[in-house]
Image (cartoon, rainbow, N blue to C red):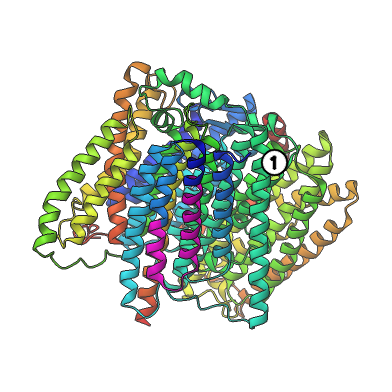
C-alpha cells in the first residue's frame, strides 16, 4: 500500500487543477480535496507506525536511475501536521475570501503549496528536492502577494529574491554532490558520502541556501514583513509550514545524509545562531506594535529553539538518549506549527472585526471575541512551553539533553526565551481584557473562530497528552 | 581541429562569456544590461553546444536568451513610462561611504573565496572522478524507455516526476502573474513590412515547433524547445499588434495551461489503476505515451510563456463576473 | 593538465561568484534578477562540464536533463519577479 506516497503528492495537485478549471465550485472542490488528503496523510502515519520506513520507486525504476519517495516517522508526523493545519486553515479561508476573484486565484495556489510541501517531505532525491523547493517558494510568494497591497507585494518580492538566492546556493551544492559521488539519491548518498572537502563545501552551500529559507538569524530579515503583510490564512501557512519544511531539510541533510561529515563545531555554530534568533526574535516580538509583526518575530524565535538541538543530536551516540532528544525536537516543531497557525488565524479574526491588528487598540477583545482570545491564550501556552503543551515536552528534552552533554548555555537561552515569550503573550492578553466584566456571547462568528481554537488546543493540550505515541512512532519509523 | 586550436576556441569563448556576464551586471543602464544579458545567453548556448549538449543549447537559446530577454525588455518598456521602476535603485541603503566600501570589498572577497573553494573542490573531483553508474544505467535501460534520445528518456521517463513538478512550477508562476493584475496594453498594428514578415514567420515557427516535438524522441529537441518556439510565435504576433495573440479565451486558456500537469497526472493515474507504478510506462507503449505527454506539455509551456510575456491576465480572459 | 572539463568547470565557478557578488550588493531589482540568472548559468556550466566526457564518448545525459529543468524553473521565477515589480510600480504610481 505504498501508493499512498504518490497519492499524497498527486491528489492536491489534481485538486489545484480542478479548482483552476471550475472557479465557481473552487471552494467546495478544495475542501473536499483537503479532507481526502488529510485522511490519506493519516493512513500514511498508520502505515509507517506499523511497517516502518516506506519506499516508493516512481516509474518502477530503481532509486538512483529514477526518483524514490520515502516516508519515515519524521516525515510522516510532519505530513500529518501539514495536513491538519492546511485543513483547518482552509475552512477559515473559505470564510475569509469573500470576493470571487480572490477566491478563484487563492484555491489553486493554495493546493499547489500543499503539493509542494508534501512533495518536499516525501522526496528521496536531491535534485527533486531543489524542484520542490522552487515550487514551494513560488507558490508561497504568489499567495503572499494576493490582495495586491503595496506592503504585501514589496515583502513578497523580497521574499522571492531571497528564496531564489537560497535555491541557487542549494543547487550549487547539489551539482558538487553529483560531481563527487555520481548519485542524487539520498539513501545511496548517506552510504557513500565521506568527510572530504567536496562534501563539506556542498553541505555548506546547501545549508546556506536552506538557512535563508528557514530564516535563521541573521538571514531572517525577509520574514517579518512577508508574514505580517500576507492575508491571514497565508501567514498561518507560511509561519507554521513553509519555514518548517526548509528546517526539515536541514535536519535531514545534517542527521541523515551527511551524518559523517558534520562536525561538533558546525553544530555549535548552528546552535549559536539559533540562540541569537531566540533572544533577538523574542525581544523584537515584545516590542512589536502589531499582532502580526509580533507573531512573525515569534516564529523567528521559535525556529531558533529548533536549532539549539543540533549540538545534542550531534554529540549523543545512537540510543535512547538520542531518540528522546530527536523526539523532543519534533514535538517542539509540531507544537509550534499548530500554535502559530492558530495564532495567525485568531489574529485574522480580530483584524477583520476591528480593521487593524494594533496591540494597543485591543481593548475589550476578550469580551467581544472570547473564543478567539482563549485561542490566543492557548497559543501562548504552547509558545511559552507550559505544561501540558507539546512544547513543554520538547523544551524539557532540550534542557535534559543540554544537561547531559554539559552544554549549559542552551539552558540559559531556553529559559530567557521562555520568559520573553511569557512577556509578550501576557502583553497581548493584558490589552485584550477590557473593562467589561462578562462576555456577551460565547461565539461571535463560529465558522471563523473554530479553526483557530482547534489548532491552538492541539498545540497546547493534545500534543502534550499524546506525546508518548510520538516517540514510539519515531522508533517504529526509524 | 587539433587540440590546441580547440583550446584557443574554448579560451576565447569562455573569456567572452565571462566578460559579457561582468558587463551585464556592472552596467548602470538597465537597457544595456538586458541586451548584454541576452548576448550572454546566446554565447552560452554556443558553449553548451561545444560541450555536446545540443538539447540544452536549443533550450538556452530559445528560453534562456530569447524568452527571458523578451520578458526583461517588456518589463523595461513598462517602466520607461513610470517614475519608479525596474531600473531604479532600491530605496534602502545609503549608509556612510566608508561602510559601503567595506561591505563591497568583504562581499567581493567572500565571493572570490567561494570561487576558489569551488574550483579547488572540482579539481580534486576531476582527479578522482566519481563512478558513472548513472550514465551507464541510462544507457542500459534506454531500449526500455521508448525513445532513443537519452536526454528525453531521462526527462520524460526515468525522472518524469521532476518534469511533472517542473510543469507545476510553470503553472504556479503563471497563476501568480494572473493574480497580480491584467495584461499590458498591446502594441500598435505593425507596418506593412513587419506584418508581411509575421504572416510568413509565424507558420514557420509553428511548423518548427511541431518538428522539434516530433524529433525529440531520437534527436535533440523535445517539448520544452518546441514550447518555447511556439511561444516565440505568440510573441511575434503580439509585437505585430495583433489583438488575438494565439491565446484561446478564458476557459480554454485555463485548460491549456493545466494540460501539461493534467496529462501527466492522467497517464500516471491510469497506469496506477492498471497495477503498474505511477508513470511506469509499459515498454511497448512508452514512446506513444511520452509523445502524448510532450504534446500537452508543449502547449502548456507555450501558453505559459506567452501569458508571462503579456504580463498578466490577457484581455479576452475574464473570471466569471457573477458572484 | 587543463582539460576541457576543468576549464569549463572553473569558468562556471567564476560566473557563480560574479552572480553571487552582484546579487548580494543591493543594486536595482533588475540587476538582482539578472545576477541570480547569471549565478544559475554558472551552476549549469559546472554541471555540463561534469557531464562532458570528451569527443569520443557520449556525455552523461542526466546533468543535461537537470540543466534543462533548471532553465525552465529560472524563467518561471524571473517572470513572477518581473510581474511583482510591475505591480509594485503601478501601486507606487497611484500614490
Q: Is B36 inside the magenta-drawn segment?
A: yes
* Chain ID at mark 1: A
Is residue A48 left or right of A258 when viewed as pictured?
left
Q: Nearer the viewer, residue A175 or B313?
A: A175
Q: Is the magenta stretch mostly helix, strand or loop?
A: helix
Q: Residue at x 65, y 65 (%)?
A: B107
Q: Is residue B259 above or below residue B40?
A: above
Specify whether residue A157 is in view.
Answer: no
Is residue C85 left or right of C41 when viewed as pictured?
left
Q: Is residue C68 above or below residue B240?
A: above
Q: Is B183 inside the magenta-drawn segment?
A: no
Q: Residue at x 46, y 39 (%)?
A: B51
Is residue B314 left or right of B287 when viewed as pictured?
left
Q: Is residue A322 above or below residue A293?
A: above
Q: Is residue C36 above or below residue A41?
A: below
Q: Quadrant of residue B104?
A: bottom right
Residue wearing tag 1? A199
Report x, y in % for residue A206.
63, 48
Is residue A53 left or right of A236 when viewed as pictured?
right
> Which residues fall within the magenta stretch?
B10-39
Q: Which residue is drawn at 56% across and 50% down?
A: C11
Amino acid at each position: 500500500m505504498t501508493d499512498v506516497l504518490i497519492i499524497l503528492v498527486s491528489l492536491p495537485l489534481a485538486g489545484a487543477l480542478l479548482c483552476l478549471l471550475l472557479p465557481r465550485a473552487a471552494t467546495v472542490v478544495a475542501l473536499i480535496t483537503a479532507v481526502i488528503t488529510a485522511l490519506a496523510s493519516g493512513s500514511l502515519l498508520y502505515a509507517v507506525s506499523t511497517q516502518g520506513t516506506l519506499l516508493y520507486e516512481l516509474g518502477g525504476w530503481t532509486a538512483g536511475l529514477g526518483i524514490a519517495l520515502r516516508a519515515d516517522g519524521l516525515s510522516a508526523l510532519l505530513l500529518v501536521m501539514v495536513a491538519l493545519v492546511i485543513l483547518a486553515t482552509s475552512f477559515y479561508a473559505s470564510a475569509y475570501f469573500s470576493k470571487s476573484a480572490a477566491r478563484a486565484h487563492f484555491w489553486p495556489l493554495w493546493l499547489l503549496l500543499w503539493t509542494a510541501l508534501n512533495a518536499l517531505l516525501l522526496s528521496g532525491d536531491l535534485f527533486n528536492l531543489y524542484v520542490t523547493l522552487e515550487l514551494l517558494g513560488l507558490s508561497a510568494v504568489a499567495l503572499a502577494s494576493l490582495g495586491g497591497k503595496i506592503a504585501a507585494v514589496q515583502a513578497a518580492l523580497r521574499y522571492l529574491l531571497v528564496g531564489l538566492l537560497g535555491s541557487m546556493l542549494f543547487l550549487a551544492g547539489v551539482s558538487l554532490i553529483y560531481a563527487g559521488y555520481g548519485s542524487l539519491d539520498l539513501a545511496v548518498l548517506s552510504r557513500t558520502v565521506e568527510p572530504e572537502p567536496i562534501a563539506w563545501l556542498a553541505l555548506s552551500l546547501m545549508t546556506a541556501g536552506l538557512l535563508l529559507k528557514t530564516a535563521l538569524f541573521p538571514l531572517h530579515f525577509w520574514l517579518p514583513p512577508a508574514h505580517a503583510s500576507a492575508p491571514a490564512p497565508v501567514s498561518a501557512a507560511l509561519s507554521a509550514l513553509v519555514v518548517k519544511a526548509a528546517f526539515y531539510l536541514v535536519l535531514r541533510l545534517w542527521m541523515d545524509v551527511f551524518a559523517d561529515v558534520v562536525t561538533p563545531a558546525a553544530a555549535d555554530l548552528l546552535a549559536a545562531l539559533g540562540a541569537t534568533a531566540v533572544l533577538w526574535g523574542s525581544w523584537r516580538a515584545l516590542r512589536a506594535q502589531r499582532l502580526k509583526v509580533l507573531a512573525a518575530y515569534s516564529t523567528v524565535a521559535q525556529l531558533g529553539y529548533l536549532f539549539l538541538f543540533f549540538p545534542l543530536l550531534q554529540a549523543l551516540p545512537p540510543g535512547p538518549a538520542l531518540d528522546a532528544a530527536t523526539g523532543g525536537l519534533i514535538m517542539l516543531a509540531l507544537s509550534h506549527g499548530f500554535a502559530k497557525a492558530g495564532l495567525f488565524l485568531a489574529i485574522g479574526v480580530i483584524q477583520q472585526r476591528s480593521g487593524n491588528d494594533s496591540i494597543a487598540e485591543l481593548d475589550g477583545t476578550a469580551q467581544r471575541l472570547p473564543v478567539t482570545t482563549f485561542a490566543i491564550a492557548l497559543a501562548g501556552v504552547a509558545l511559552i512551553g507550559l505544561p501540558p503543551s507539546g512544547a513543554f515536552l520538547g523544551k524539557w528534552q532540550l534542557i535534559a539533553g543540554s544537561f547531559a552533554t554539559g552544554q549549559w548555555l542552551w539552558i540559559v537561552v531556553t529559559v530567557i526565551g521562555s520568559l520573553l515569550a511569557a512577556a509578550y503573550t501576557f502583553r497581548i492578553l493584558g490589552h485584550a481584557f477590557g473593562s467589561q466584566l462578562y462576555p456577551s456571547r460565547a461565539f461571535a462568528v463560529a465558522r471563523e473562530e473554530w479553526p483557530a481554537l482547534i489548532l491552538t488546543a492541539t498545540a497546547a493540550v493534545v500534543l502534550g497528552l499524546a506525546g508518548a505515541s510520538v516517540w514510539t512512532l519515531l522508533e517504529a519509523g526509524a | 581541429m587539433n587540440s590546441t586550436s580547440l583550446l584557443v576556441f574554448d579560451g576565447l569563448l569562455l573569456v567572452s562569456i565571462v566578460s559579457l556576464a561582468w558587463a551585464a551586471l556592472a552596467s548602470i543602464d538597465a537597457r544595456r544590461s538586458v541586451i548584454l544579458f541576452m548576448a550572454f545567453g546566446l554565447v552560452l548556448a554556443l558553449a553548451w553546444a561545444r560541450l555536446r549538449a545540443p538539447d540544452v543549447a536549443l533550450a538556452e537559446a530559445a528560453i534562456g536568451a530569447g524568452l527571458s530577454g523578451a520578458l526583461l525588455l517588456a518589463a523595461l518598456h513598462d517602466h520607461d513610462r513610470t517614475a519608479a521602476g525596474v531600473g531604479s535603485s532600491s530605496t534602502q541603503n545609503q549608509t556612510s561611504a566608508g561602510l559601503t566600501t567595506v561591505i563591497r570589498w568583504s562581499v567581493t572577497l567572500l565571493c572570490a573565496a567561494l570561487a576558489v573553494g569551488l574550483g579547488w573542490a572540482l579539481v580534486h573531483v576531476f582527479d578522482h572522478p566519481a563512478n558513472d553508474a548513472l550514465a551507464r544505467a541510462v544507457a542500459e535501460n534506454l531500449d526500455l524507455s521508448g525513445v532513443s534520445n537519452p536526454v528525453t528518456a531521462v526527462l520524460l521517463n526515468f525522472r518524469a516526476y521532476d518534469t511533472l513538478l517542473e510543469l507545476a512550477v510553470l503553472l504556479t508562476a503563471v497563476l501568480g502573474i494572473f493574480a497580480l493584475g491584467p495584461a499590458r496594453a498591446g502594441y500598435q498594428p505593425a507596418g506593412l513590412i513587419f506584418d508581411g514578415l509575421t504572416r510568413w514567420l509565424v507558420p514557420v515557427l509553428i511548423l518548427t515547433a511541431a518538428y522539434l516535438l516530433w524529433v525529440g524522441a531520437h534527436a535533440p529537441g523535445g517539448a520544452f524547445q518546441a514550447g518555447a518556439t511556439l511561444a516565440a510565435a505568440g510573441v511575434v504576433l503580439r509585437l505585430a499588434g495583433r489583438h488575438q495573440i494565439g491565446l484561446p479565451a478564458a476557459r480554454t486558456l485555463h485548460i491549456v495551461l493545466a494540460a501539461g500537469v493534467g496529462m501527466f497526472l492522467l497517464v500516471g493515474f491510469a497506469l496506477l489503476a492498471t497495477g503498474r507504478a505511477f508513470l511506469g510506462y509499459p515498454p511497448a507503449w512508452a514512446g506513444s505515451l511520452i509523445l502524448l505527454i510532450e504534446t500537452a506539455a508543449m502547449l502548456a509551456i507555450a501558453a505559459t510563456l506567452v501569458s508571462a510575456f503579456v504580463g498578466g491576465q490577457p484581455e479576452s480572459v475574464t473570471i466569471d463576473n457573477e458572484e | 593538465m587543463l582539460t576541457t572539463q576543468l576549464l569549463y568547470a572553473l569558468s562556471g565557478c567564476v560566473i557563480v561568484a560574479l552572480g553571487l557578488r552582484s546579487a548580494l550588493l543591493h543594486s536595482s531589482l533588475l540587476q538582482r534578477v539578472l545576477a541570480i540568472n547569471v549565478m544559475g548559468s554558472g551552476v549549469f556550466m559546472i554541471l555540463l562540464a561534469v557531464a562532458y566526457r570528451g569527443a569520443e564518448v557520449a556525455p552523461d545525459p542526466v546533468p543535461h536533463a537537470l540543466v534543462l529543468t533548471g532553465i525552465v524553473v529560472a524563467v518561471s521565477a524571473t517572470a513572477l519577479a518581473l510581474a511583482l515589480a510591475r505591480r509594485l510600480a503601478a501601486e507606487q504610481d497611484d500614490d
